[in-house]
Image (cartoon, rainbow, N blue to C red):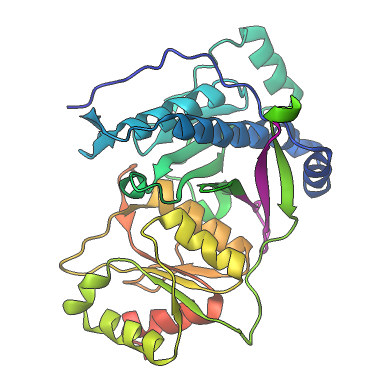
Amino acid sequence: MTTSHSLKAAAPPAAPLTAALTTHLASLLPSSSRDSLRTSVLPSLLTAIAATSTALRAAQDVSLAGSSNSFGDDQLNVDVLAEEAIRLCLAQCPSVVTASSEEDPVEKPVQHTGLPFQVVEAEQDRTHGEVYTVAFDPLDGSSIIAPNWTVGTIFSLWDGTSALGASPKEKQIGAVLGVYGPRTTAVVALRFPGEEKGICFEVGLSDSSEAGKGQEWDLIRSTVSYAPPPFKTRYFAPANLRSTNTHAAYAKLVAHYMAENYTLRYCGGLVPDVVHALVKGHGVYLSPVTETSKAKLRRLYELFPLALVVECCGGRAVDPVSGENILGEKGVEGCDERGGIVCGTAEEVEYAKKVLCGQD
């Protein structure tokens, strides 16, 4: 049974952007048609990541919350904390009009609590109806948070008032991966309709509380991309490794990586495993689908945004069963549609696809 938990908290304070990051966003989004995206939506998503980071640092005890989400998954107290911190931030952004999450997987209008109706209306008039839908996984990797391993948040940003039934290739225009480890960082990817290539950059949250400045986001890397060959070190991250016992193609693929002296880097957290390859410039992440290991990654909250980040960095993301690109014209009709993924360096994804799909 799903129950709700309320922190009855006020909206978290905004985590401002440094001058360097503000200038960078202005250079990437000079058009007035994306004014709200630059000045309100992206800053709100980054504030949500900062608020979640703060909430996680304050949550010394990780335990079951005594509730489950609509998918039947047991919720941890940190899942609930992250969900509420993000919802509070979205409520302060007039251009985000619809939201759904893996913890509350129903698209609902965003209640802009605390913002006078006139403010919301004026902002939407000023931006000529520029409105967005946000789909998010508030805490990816909550199963590994108890030992204090790195976890993340995944945001998927869509043009319009709904992500359901929409083409992810055309309507999903942004994705943000928040990473909570020794540092708090975020990878931001943007690609607009009609564009073949997207843009991706990395930001970091600094805490200047000792200097009385509070938290602020700064630019770490203005461009994030996979490196071209030749590769000094090659990495692979194989999820559900035990399925190699029953999946011959997956076993063959893992044996190839071992024989070719690839470096294994897998922590069990989707966000940190994918971001590791972006930091190193090379890597392939594999989450296969087998008869004994059914698809578990949700397209709306995990596969679509991860695929956008990977493609914007020059990589590929494909379905491990069909071999088709994750980001095609076909969207989702419901929030619980699931699949697997192979993503990362384009050459590695192509090889893995051939092995897994029997094309080698």
Q: Position of residue 211 (x, y in %)?
A: 75, 28
Name the residue nearer the viewer: 227 or 36: 227
Q: Position of residue 274 (x, y in %)?
A: 49, 62
Residue 192 sits inside the magenta stretch: yes
Q: Is residue 305 visible?
A: yes
Does 156 lie within the magenta span?
A: no
Q: Which residues are magenta?
A: 187-208
Would you place residue 88 above or below residue 248 in this image?
above
Count of marks placed on residues: 0
Q: Is residue 7 left or right of residue 321?
A: right
| In the foreground, 152 or 38 | 152
At horizontal 43% and vertical 32% (from top left) the residue drawn is: 82
Residue 280 image point, x, y percent: 59, 70
Rendered location of residue 264, percent (x, y):
42, 75
Say which residue appears at 20% left-offset and 64% top-offset.
Answer: 293
Q: Is residue 346 left or right of residue 333?
A: right
User: In which quadrant is the C terminus drawn?
Assistant: bottom left
Instruction: Locate the N terminus and report the quarter of the image it occupies.
Output: top left
